[in-house]
Amino acid sequence: LTIEPPRCAWHPDRETYIVCTRCDTPICPDCMTPAAVGFQCPNCVAAGQQAVRSTNASAAVASPDTRPLVSWTLIGVCVAIYGAQFLLGVDDIAASFGMQPVAIAFGGEYYRLLTSVFLHGSLLHLLFNMYVLYVLGPTMERILGHSRFALLFLVSGLGGAVASYALSAPTTLSVGASGAIFGVMGA
């Protein structure tokens, strides 16, 4: 009995002992494409590229999850609150809701740790913070997802307020999203 050597499926005149790692079809060196493990035949390579194309095409369709809804919402909330501050008096609102250690320690006004994150002392202060949130927020939100990004912003803002509480003089009044913004920048 003589055994015929395997021949390339695309070049029957060439003898080969290399097979496609996906479909076990004999392939010659001219037909093989290096893969992560072994070599693939032209059919399997084409099928793989088709699968990649269909996956990329479906990923290209924008879904609501890719829009930076939390970033836009936070910017909108901060701008709206500053608008209210402007109408009602920036200093009056800051005195009532800004982070002030004495009001928290002796007045039990713990809400000031959170409300101070959304207040701003001037238009320039607001613009700088919102510009950074506009530039970095959408990218971080896409990486982390909506809820984790919102949690990052709130925890960073609270962390900044707690640091201000611990390190400031008791009567110091502080406002701003800077702690939250630094948390987003750090992440």
Image: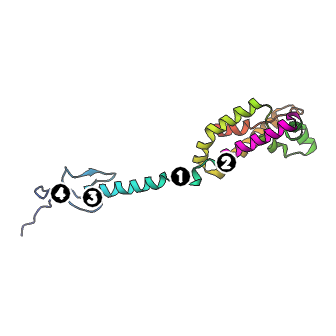
Image quarter in which the N terminus is found: bottom left
Q: Which residue is mark 1?
A: 62
Residue found 75% across the figure and 44% down from its top: 77
Q: Which residue is mark 4?
A: 10
**Amino acid under label 1?**
Ala
Q: Which residue is mark 3?
A: 43
**Amino acid under label 3?**
Asn
Label 1, label 2: how far apart the Cα atoms are = 17 Å
Q: Nearer the viewer, residue 69 or 95?
A: 69
Q: Which residue is mark 2?
A: 70
**Amino acid under label 4?**
Trp
Residue found 34% across the figure and 56% down from its top: 48
- Whichever of callouts 1 and 3 sits on the residue coming sooner in the sequence is 3
- Whichever of callouts 1 and 2 sits on the residue coming sooner in the sequence is 1
Dot 1: what SS? loop
* Magenta stretch contains residue 24: no
The reply to whether dot 4 and dot 1 touch (C-beta < 8 Å) is no
